[in-house]
C-alpha cells in the first residue's frame, strides 16, 4: 500500500494556471435626450468636461480605471484583462467625489452624489454601465449610454385668465410674474440608485421645517424675464419665456418636490405650487402652458417661507349649490296684532 501511495504521489502533475491576458478598449459615451420628453438637451445639459471609466470583473472587483479631462466623448487606450466585464462611465463628477478610490462595483453604486455641490448649469453628473466581453484581439470598442442623475422641470408658458368662473372682479387687477423656484429638492442620491432617494438626508428649501429659506441657486431658482415688461400680463395675454430648473430623484410620499410660480396680483404676492409625485433621474417634467384663473396662496414675497405661508398646491373642485328662501319672520304689533286707535 505504501508503494502504491508513493507511486501515486510521483505521478501527480502540477496544475497549470492560465495567465490573465491583456485587453485594450476604447470607451465612447452617449448622452441621450431626457427619457420622458421628445425635447433634446438644451444649453449645456449634455456638456462633458470629465470622464471616469471603471472596468469591473465578474466578481465585481476593479480591473481598470482611467480618468479623462476634456470634452471629447471617447476615452481611448484603456488596459484591462480579458473576459466578461461591467464597464462604467461616470461623467462630470467633481474631483474628490471618491469615484477614483472605489475598488468594487458595489461600492461605486453606493457612492453618494450631492446635487448642489456636484452639479451646475454648465455640467451635470451622469452615470451609466454596460456589460462587455473583452478579448485580446485588437482594440475592443465599448459604448456606454450615460444618463443625468438630475431631472429637469421645465415650464414654457403662463397665460393670464383671471376673471373666468365668476371671478370677474379680478380681471382688471395688475398681474406680474415674479419668479420660479423648487422646494423639497433632494441633495443626496447614490450613483446606482436610479429612482431611489431613500438615503437622502438633506433637502434644499425644506418646507417641512418652516421658516425655510428659499434657495436661490441657479439650478433651483429663476427670476422672471422683465425685459420690456414681458412679465406683466394683460388679461388674456401670455408670458412665453422658457424656464428650466433641476432636481435629484425624490420618491417621498410626504415631501414631494414642487415647482412654485410666484405672481404679484394687484400689489399682493401669491404662489402657485405644483407637486411632482415622483422625480426620477433624467426625466424631463414639462408644463406647456399654465393658465391662471384665480388667486393662489398668499405670500409676503420675501426669501423665507414662513409658517403662515402655504406651499400646498391649489386644488379646485366643483359642487352644486341650492338656495332656500326663508319665510318671513312674524312680528305681531300691538296686542297680538290688534291695534285700537
Image: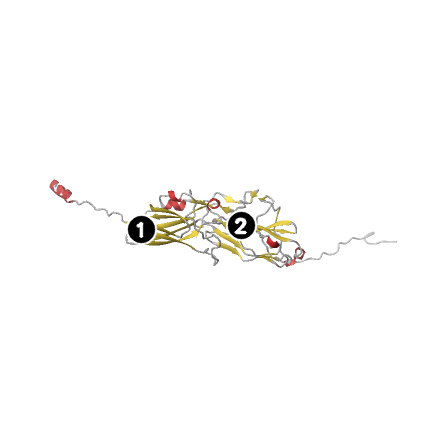
The residue shown at (49%, 52%) is 152
Q: Position of residue 100 (x, y in %)?
A: 38, 44
Q: Which residue is mark 1?
A: 24
- Relative to 188, 224 lies left or right: right
Q: Which residue is mark 2?
A: 258
Label 2 crowd (10 A; few <14 / some 14-19 / many >=20): many
Q: Position of residue 223 (x, y in %)?
A: 57, 50
In the current view of this chain or complex, which residue is farthest to the right? 341
Q: Position of residue 63 (x, y in %)?
A: 32, 46
- Mark 2: secondary structure: strand
Q: Nearer the viewer, mark 1 or mark 2?
A: 1
- Relative to 192, 12 lies left or right: left
Quadrant of the frame with the N terminus: top left
Given residues 34 and 334, the one toward you in this image is 34
Given residues 219 and 337, the one toward you in this image is 219
Residue 2 in view: yes
- Relative to 5, 232 lies left or right: right
- Relative to 5, 117 lies left or right: right
Q: Quadrant of residue 137?
A: bottom left
In the current view of this chain or complex, which residue is farthest to the left? 3
The residue shown at (31%, 51%) is 24
Residue 210 in view: no
| Count of numbered tags | 2
Q: Earlier in the sequence, mark 1 or mark 2?
A: 1
In the current view of this chain or complex, which residue is farthest to the top? 2
Q: Tell me, yes or no, whether the two marked residues, 1 and 2, touch with CB atoms within 8 Å.
A: no
Given residues 58 and 31, the one toward you in this image is 31
Amino acid at each position: 500500500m505504501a508503494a502504491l501511495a508513493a507511486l501515486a504521489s510521483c505521478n501527480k502533475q502540477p496544475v497549470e494556471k492560465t495567465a490573465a491576458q491583456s485587453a485594450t478598449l476604447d470607451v465612447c459615451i452617449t448622452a441621450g435626450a431626457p427619457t420622458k420628453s421628445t425635447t433634446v438637451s438644451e444649453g449645456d445639459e449634455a456638456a462633458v468636461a470629465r470622464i471616469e471609466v471603471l472596468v469591473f470583473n465578474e466578481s465585481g472587483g476593479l480591473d481598470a480605471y482611467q480618468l479623462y479631462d476634456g470634452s471629447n466623448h471617447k476615452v481611448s487606450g484603456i488596459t484591462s484583462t480579458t473576459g466578461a466585464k461591467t464597464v462604467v462611465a461616470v461623467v462630470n463628477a467633481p474631483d474628490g467625489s471618491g469615484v477614483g478610490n472605489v475598488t468594487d462595483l458595489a461600492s461605486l453604486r453606493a457612492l453618494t452624489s450631492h446635487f448642489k455641490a456636484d452639479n451646475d448649469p454648465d455640467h451635470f453628473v451622469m452615470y451609466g454601465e454596460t456589460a462587455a466581453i473583452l478579448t485580446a484581439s485588437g482594440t475592443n470598442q465599448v459604448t456606454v449610454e450615460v444618463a443625468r442623475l438630475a431631472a429637469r422641470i421645465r415650464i414654457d408658458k403662463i397665460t393670464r385668465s383671471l376673471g373666468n368662473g365668476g371671478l370677474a372682479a379680478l380681471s382688471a387687477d395688475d398681474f406680474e410674474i415674479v419668479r420660479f423656484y423648487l422646494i423639497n429638492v433632494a441633495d443626496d442620491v447614490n450613483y446606482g440608485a436610479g429612482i431611489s432617494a431613500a438615503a437622502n438626508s438633506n433637502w434644499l428649501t425644506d418646507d417641512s421645517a418652516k421658516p425655510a429659506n428659499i434657495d436661490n441657486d441657479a439650478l433651483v431658482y429663476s427670476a422672471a424675464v422683465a425685459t420690456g415688461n414681458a412679465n406683466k400680463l394683460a388679461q388674456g395675454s401670455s408670458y412665453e419665456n422658457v424656464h428650466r430648473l433641476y432636481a435629484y430623484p425624490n420618491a417621498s410620499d410626504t415631501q414631494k418636490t414642487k415647482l412654485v410660480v410666484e405672481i404679484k396680483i394687484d400689489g399682493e404676492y401669491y404662489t402657485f405650487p405644483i407637486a411632482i409625485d415622483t422625480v426620477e433621474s433624467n426625466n424631463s417634467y414639462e408644463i406647456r402652458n399654465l393658465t391662471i384663473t384665480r388667486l393662489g396662496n398668499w405670500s409676503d414675497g420675501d426669501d423665507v417661507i414662513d409658517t403662515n405661508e402655504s406651499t400646498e398646491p391649489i386644488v379646485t373642485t366643483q359642487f352644486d349649490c341650492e338656495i332656500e328662501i326663508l319665510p318671513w319672520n312674524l312680528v305681531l304689533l300691538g296686542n297680538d296684532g290688534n291695534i285700537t286707535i
